[in-house]
Structure formats: C-alpha cells, structure tokens
Amino acid sequence: MSDERTSKDSHKEKTEGRSPSKDITPVLRGWDYEPGTINVRKVSGLDGSPKLQMRQDLGLLQMEMSGRPDGRRPHGYESLLEYFENQLADHRRRHSGSEDGFHLSRSQCQSLRDEAMMYYWRYLSLFVLEDFTGVVRDTARNIRVLDLCGKFAIDEQDQLVLEQYRPYIVMMNTRAQASLETSEKRHADALHTIDAGLSRIRAFFERFGQEDAYGQANEVRVLKRLAREIRKKLPVNPLERLERKLERAVRDERYEEAARIRDRISDMKTSRASKKEIR
C-alpha cells in the first residue's frame, strides 16, 4: 500500500501545476491518414453542435457545419464576402445605384481567397458525406467570390486568379444540385440542371477564347457521365426500347429478328395513331 501511495504522490508531483496537454495524438489515434482519399467525419462539438473533421497528413481540419467554417464573424457578418457585398449595397444606395468607385484592394482580395479556401474544404467534405444541400450552398457562395473579385478588384491579377477554378466550382455545384433532384426522382429536372451547368462551363471557355478546351475538360466529362447515369433511371418508352433492339439486330446482322421487330414497331405506331384519332 505504501509503495502504491508513493507512486501516486510522485505522479501528482510531476503533473501538478501543469496545464492539460494540447497534444492531438489521442484524437487521431485509430483514424489514419490515407493518401489519395478524402477522409471526413461528423462529430459532436463541446458546444453540442455538429462539427466536420477532415483527416490530413499532419493532423485534421475541424469546421462548423454552417456559417463561416472557422466559426468567426468578421465585422459582425457571416463572412467577409457578406461584409463586402453589404459594403457594395451601401455604395449603390449612396450613389443612386451606381457601382462606380467601388473597388477591392489586393489585401482584401487575398482575404477573400483565403476565406474561399475554407469553404472549399467544407464543401468537399460535405460532398463526401452526401450533404448535397450544403455543397450547393457553399459552391454558390464561392462563385459569388469569383464574381465580386472579377468585377471590383483593382489589380487585374486579382480579377483573374480565381477564374481558373470556375469550371470546377460550377461542376461541383451542378453535381450536388442534380444529385438532390435525382434523390427526389426528379430525373428530368436533374438533366436540365446538368445541361445548364455544361452551358455555364462552355461560356467560361468561350469567354477566354478556349472553345476547343471545353470538350477536353474533366469537369465536362464528369457531368456528361452523370447525365448518362441519370438517363438510365428514366422510364423507358416501349417504342424506344424496340427501336434500340432493332438497331442492335441490324448491327449484328440478325435480319429475321429485325424484321419481326419492325412489324411490332409498325403495329405499335398504328395503334397509337388510332388512339389519337379516337380522341
């Protein structure tokens, strides 16, 4: 008993007066970093609200689920973007709707880019967790950053430096919105969303005189692949199904089968025409 008591007293003496360790090793234990993958999880914060965590090679990022990812409120606003948008609105009110004279300095643009990076990490994490509503929100928000800097930055480099990411952000926004619509069985709306996203990406390349790059862009391939997957989920028209069978039969030189399919197609079209006449 005396030895045990002595050991406890010795440990107490070594730790007494020390602040709690800030070593995050216990938090990371059992959650190894995996190169080439995006490892994220949702945890409960000390304040009781959910937090996002992304595992990185030397630690982790922890983000708020909404608002600015780091939880701060610059100038009392949700983010710097909202602050500068409010400044622009005030400028318009004071100048009869004119935007002349409103500018963003180099340091302001840099701060907006740093903030946009926080939202990038969050919408990437949310996409992995299939929180598509959050992805739509954060990607749309970052597109507003590109628009604001592109229009009001004093320095030309600040106007253009983020533009290279526009196709990617549009693609992520489109994927998330189309995924939401697909989950609600709104397949036609999802395809329309993808077409609109592809049009926005095409407009980007045309704006910079790079029309040929559109067809080679990975963002375009991703959205077209998604569109093909969604079309597979659409109800198949019986006539269209027969026409596809006919094409395959002719291609494979199965001519007797092709003839039977043609007869069925002809009968189906005649039947449909008769029903229309009756109506």
Image (cartoon, helix red, strand yellow):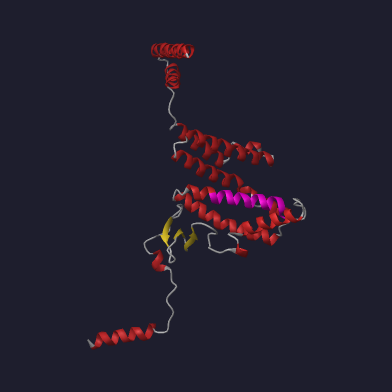
Q: Relative to 182, is 80 above or below?
A: below
- Comparing 56 with 143, the one in front is 143
- Comparing 133 with 255, the one in front is 133
How many numbered marks have been drawn onto this rendered protein structure? 0
- Residue 258 picture location, percent across and down: 41, 14
- Comparing 131 with 82, the one in front is 82
**Residue displayed at 54% across by 50% down:** 137
- Residue 197 picture location, percent across and down: 57, 39
Q: Is residue 147 magenta?
A: yes
- Toward the left, the furthest residue is 1
Q: Relative to 6, is 166 above or below?
A: above
- Residue 169 picture location, percent across and down: 57, 47
Q: Would residue 247 be found to the left or right of residue 87 on screen?
A: left
Q: Is residue 9 magenta?
A: no
- Toward the front, the furthest residue is 279
Image quarter hosting the N terminus: bottom left
Q: Main secondary structure of the magenta part?
A: helix
Residue extent of the magenta highlight: 137-153
- Comparing 103 with 2, the one in front is 103
Q: Would residue 26 be found to the left or right of residue 215 on screen?
A: left
Question: Is residue 73 at least partly visible in the picture?
Answer: yes
**Residue displayed at 30% across by 84% down:** 8
**Residue displayed at 52% across by 55% down:** 121
Give the quarter of the image for residue 6.
Answer: bottom left
Question: Is residue 155 at least partly visible in the picture?
Answer: no
Q: Would residue 16 be found to the left or right of residue 126 on screen?
A: left
- Residue 166 picture location, percent across and down: 61, 46
**Residue displayed at 48% across by 53% down:** 125
